[in-house]
Amino acid sequence: MKFFLCGSSCFSSGSKATIINDRSSLPGEQSHGNLRLFSSNELEIATQNFSPSNKIGEGGFGCVYKGWLEDGSVVAVKVLSVEVESMRGEREFISEIAALSDIKHENLVTLRGCCVDGAKRYLVYDYMENNSLVHTLLGQEHNRAKFSWEARRGISLGVARGIAYLHDEVQPRILHRDIKASNILLDQNFTPKVSDFGLSRALRDNTSHVSTHVAGTL
């Protein structure tokens, strides 16, 4: 049996992560709380069947593809990669993703929703026009942006604010533990957005918020 989930969220400071406890009648629902259900077919259409030409990134949690939804909005679809035997059940996964989608801050990437199709897991994020710091700051010369010292300072402060929000304001707290250039995305105004927070807990059944799946720099 298949069921799908997608939700929209806008970031504003001061909100707490919440868990959706109503887990009844998930399959076939058109909505679940403030979340919408999407079909895998919609994501396939959005990404042109996950065409290699739409692939915009790849990391420890899977590949990311650019997509266009029916309403014209541009999104980034992450195809999650995790061992089936260690994966959370569908309902537990949805509960965790619902909590992550409720975390709102201007320096965190907006998680718009997800899709569950058997053992397959997809996350849908807002598309970041200026990719990550790996491309715009550390990438090949023709892809680099010229950042002034003031711009670099602004990016650094934005990243710090996003991390501080996860560590100090979200309840329960989330320790990212994998802060690196590829996890710092930039929107069209070069506003920094921290990505990939909380995914180890959402994906795996044997981890806590202090994840051992990706133990990067804290």
Image (cartoon, helix red, strand yellow):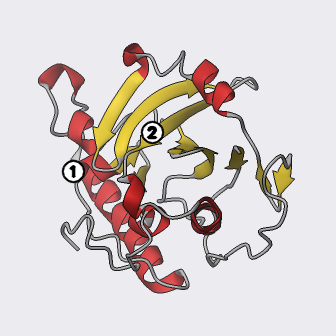
**Residue wearing tag 2:** 79
Considering only vertical position in the picture, is 156 above or below 27? Answer: below
Residue type beneath disc 2: Val
Does 50 sit left or right of 153 as displayed?
right
Residue 48 position within the rendered picture, expressed as x and y whole percent measured from the top left: 54, 15
Residue 88 position within the rendered picture, expressed as x and y whole percent measured from the top left: 50, 64
Residue 187 position within the rendered picture, expressed as x and y whole percent measured from the top left: 46, 41
Which residue shows up at 15% across the image and 39% down it? 138
Determine whether the residue tagged by mark 2 lies in a helix, strand or loop.
Answer: strand
Residue 107 position within the rendered picture, expressed as x and y whole percent measured from the top left: 47, 59
Which of the marked residues, 2 or 1, is nearer the chain's N terminus?
2
Residue 95 seen in the figure: yes
Quarter of the rendering occupied by the N terminus: top right
Residue type beneath disc 1: Trp
Which residue shows up at 45% across the image and 29% down it? 65
**Residue wearing tag 1:** 149
Considering only vertical position in the picture, is 177 above or below 101? Answer: below
Looking at the image, which is closer to me, 172 or 127?
Answer: 172
Q: Quadrant of residue 106?
A: bottom right
Q: Quadrant of residue 146?
A: top left
Q: CA distance from mark 2 to mark 1?
A: 35 Å
Does 142 sit left or right of 205 as displayed?
left
